[in-house]
Image: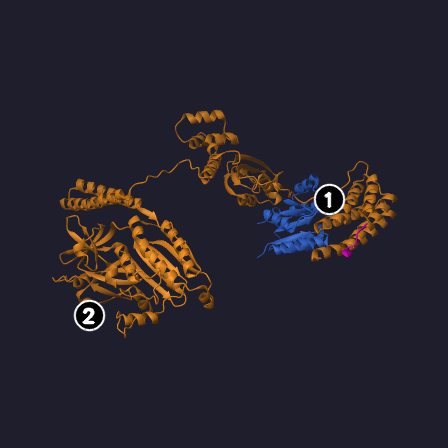
Chain colours: A blue, B orange
Amino acid sequence: MAKKILTVDDSASMRQMVTFTLKGAGYDVVEAVDGRDALSKIKGADIGMVITDLNMPNMDGIELIRQIRALPGFRFIPIILLTTESQDNKKKEGKEAGATGWIVKPFKPEQLVAVVKKVFA
Amino acid sequence: MDAHKQAFIEEAYELLAELERSLLELEDNPGDMAMVGQVFRAMHTIKGSGAMFGFEDIAAFTHNVENVFDQVRSGTIPVTRELVNLTLTARDHIRELLDASVSGKTVNESRGVDIVLALNRLVPLENGGIPQGGKGEEKKPAPDMVTYRIRFKPHQDLLAHGTNPVLLLSELRDLGDCAVTAHTENIPVLEDMDPEGLYIFWDAVLTTDKGLNAVRDVFIFVEDDADITIETILDEDDFTSAEMPRPKLGEILLKHGDISGEALHQALGSQKRIGEILVEEKIASRASVTAALTEQNQIRKRLEQRGESAAQISSVRVPSEKLDHLVDLVGELVTVQARLSQKAAKQGDPDLVAIAEDVESLTSGLRDNAMSIRMLQIGTTFATFKRLVRDLSGELGKRIELTTAGGETELDKTVIDQLKDPLVHIIRNAVDHAIEKPEERLAAGKDATGTIQLSAEHSGAHVLIRIRDDGKGLDPQVIRKKAVEKGLIPADADLEENEIQNLIFAPGFSTAAAITDLSGRGVGMDVVKKSIENLRGAIDLVSRKGEGTTITLKLPLTLAIIDGLLVQIGEGFFVLPLSSVEECVELTESQRKSSKNGNILNIRGDIVPYVRLRDEYDIRNKPPALEHVVIMETFGKRVGFVVDRVIGGHQTVIKNLGGAFRDAKDISGATILGDGTVALIIDVNKIME
C-alpha cells in the first residue's frame, strides 16, 4: 500500500501542486486547508507523514505541529514545514514545536520529493 | 499554460478580491488584528505560490508589501489611512501584473518601484525586499574523491522530531563508498533508559566526489538536534599517490579524541595488537576501535583502488618446461606415495601407516599446488577471437558480434594451448556457415547483426566451453542426405534429429556446399572432435533449424593427474574418471540373465544401458557371481560399465601409451599402481558412442 501523506495548506494551488508531485512519486495524499482541518483528518486515516504550510487561518503550522506531537500515536510522525520565511527564527520555532524538516518556498517538485524521501522512506 | 499556473492565477484573483475587502474593513476598524493577519496571509500566499509557479515579478513585488504588513502585525507600524491607501494601490498593481501575465501585455514597472519606495518610507529602517531564492542550489565545481570522517551524535530526543536516523545514514551511503560504525557504549542500563530516547551515535567514513556541501545537506534538518562533525581525512587532490598517508590505528583514535597520546604510548609499549589492548585496558570502547579500523580500511581501500596496493604481489616468469617437469616429478611422487601407502597397510606398522598418511596429505597438497601453477585464464584466448570474428565477418560482408563470458575460468596451460585450433575452427564455421548475411537475417525476422557467444564455466572437475550462434542452424534433412550419400549411415537409419546433427563430426563429412577460403582447409569437424578427445574431453552439438547452434566442449581441468575410480576385471586393473561416475550398483547373475542380450538396467525407474567391459576387452576367464556396474554420465547420457570389482578412489597419474598403442581404442592412457602394476584408463566418451 502506498504511504499516505497529509498536506496542509490554505492555498489551493499549493495543495494541488504538492498533491500532484507526491502522487507522481507514488504516495497517497490527503489534503487539509488549515491546521484545524488537518487535526480532524489525521486521526484514524493512517497518515504516515505531514507536510504543512506555516501561515494559515484558524490554526497556523507551528500550532498544528505542537498539537500533532501531543497526540498519542503521532509522537514520531515526520512533519515537514513549508515556509517562505527562510529566516532561522521560523525554522527554529518549527523545530522546537517538533518539525522534522522544512522546505523553503519556492521549491521545485523534485526538491519536495527529495525532502520527503529524506525523512520518509 | 500548465494546470498549476492556471490554478494559481484563479486563486490569486480570489485572494486579491479578499485582500480588497479586508483592507477596506481594516480602514474602518484599524485595530482589528485578525484583519491584519488576513491581509498578511493573502500577501504571503500570493508571494509564496507566485514564486513557486514562475511569477517572479509578482512574488518580488508582493514580498515588499508583505514585509510592511509583517511589521504591522508585530505592532511596529500603525494602521493608517496612508498605509491602507498604499496597500490598495499595491493590490491593484499586483492585479495588473497578473492581468499582464495572462494577456502577455507589459506593465509600467516604474509604478511598482514608486509604490515600494512609498511603502518603505513607512518602514523606519527596514531593508527593501528581494524574493528569496530556493534551497541552496549553488554549485561549486565538484572536487575529486574526498574521504570524510563524520561523527553523527544525535541528541537523545531526536526521535521526537520524527527523524529517522537510519534514513540519514542510508542517504549518506548513497553519496559514495561509506562505512558506518554504531557506538552503543552510551546505552544506559534498562532501568535508567528512556524508551523513546536515542542513545546510539555513529561514526561514518565516506569517500565521495559530491563535495562537502552534499554531506552537510544530509544532516540539514538535524543540525540543531545532533552534534555533527565532518572532517576531511583524505583529499586525493592534495596528494600524489606516493605521498598518500597510511594512518595507523592509534593515530586515528587520537585524532578522533577517543584516546590520549599518553595512553597510546603506553599501549604501544606492549606487543599485542593496538586495538585489542585499548579495548582490554578500557581506554577506548570496542565501537571506537571498530570505527577507527573501518576508517583505516576505507583509506587502504582507496589506495588499493588507485592501484597503489601496499602489499605488492610479485610474480615470477618461469619457462613452461620447468612447470612440465615439476608436474612430472609430482606425478612420480604420487606413484611412489601410493606404493608407500600400500606397503604400510600390508605391514600393519602403525608408525609407518602414520608416516604414509602424512606423506599422502602432503603429496595431495603438492599436487594441487603444482596443478594450480599451471592454470591459466581462458580469457586471453577468448580475446584473440574478437579480432578473428571481426576480420572474417568483414571479408564475408556479414555483421557479427562476438560476446564472451567466463573469461576468468582457469584451465591447464596444455589444455588451453591445444584448445585454440579446434576453437578457431568452430568459430570460423559459425562465421562462415552459420550466421547469415544481414539481408537474409532481416528477411528471417532476426537482428541484422548476428551474435556468437563464447562462454566458459566450471562443472565439477570439468570446464564447459560453449560456442553459441544465432545463425541458421543445421538442417537435419540436408545432413541426413549427405550422410547417406557419403555412406556414413544406411538410407533407412532410424535416427533422432540430434543424432543426425551430430553426424557432422563423423570422419569425411563436410557440409560446405562451396568451399571457401575459410573452410576449405581440409579440416573437418571430425578433426575438431579428435583434438578435443585427445584432451580427454567431449564435444556435443545442439542445433535448431533457423535459430542457431550451440556446441559444447567438455574438458578436464587438467591433463596430468586425475581422480580415478580403480576397478578390476579378471586379472586386469582399469581406471574410470571419477568426475563422471554417478554411482555403483550390483549386478546379480539373475538380473544378467533376465535382461538377456538387452543389457539394460533399471535404476530407480530409469532405463540405463550397460556395457560389459569384459566383452569389450575380450577378457575370457569366468566372471564372479556378483558383478558391479559403475554408472557414468556425460552430456546427460548415462551408461553403466560392468566390472568384476570396484576397488576405490585412486589418484591417477596419466602416462601416455606411446606410439605402439596409437590405435588402441577406448583406452586413453595408463597409470602405475602402488605395487607397480599398470592400470589402463578407460576412455568413457569413446565407449559411450
Where residue B390 sits: x, y (%)? Answer: 42, 56
Q: Which residue is mark 2?
A: B597
Q: CA distance from mark 2 to mark 1?
A: 100 Å
* Residue B620 sits inside the magenta stretch: no
- Closest to the camera, between mark 2 and mark 1, is 1
Q: Is residue B205 left or right of residue B326?
A: right
Quadrant for the C terminus of chain B, please.
bottom left
Residue closest to the far bottom: B492
What's the magenta region? B102-107
Q: Is residue B664 left or right of residue B525?
A: left
**Looking at the image, is B97 positioned above or below residue B480?**
above
Q: Secondary structure at mark 2?
A: loop
Q: Amino acid at mark 1?
A: Pro
Tell me the kind of residue under disc 2: Asn
Give residue A115's position: percent from left, percent from top. Answer: 62, 47
Instruction: Give the farthest residue toward the left.
Output: B621
Q: Residue B404 is drawn in which quadrant?
A: bottom left
The N terminus of chain B appears in which quarter of the rendering? bottom right
Comes first in the chain, label 2 or label 1: 1
Residue A113 visible here:
yes
- Mark 2: give few (<14), some (14-19) or many (20+) Cα within 10 Å: few
Q: B185 or B604, which is in the foreground?
A: B604
Is B304 left, or right, of B321 in this rendering? right
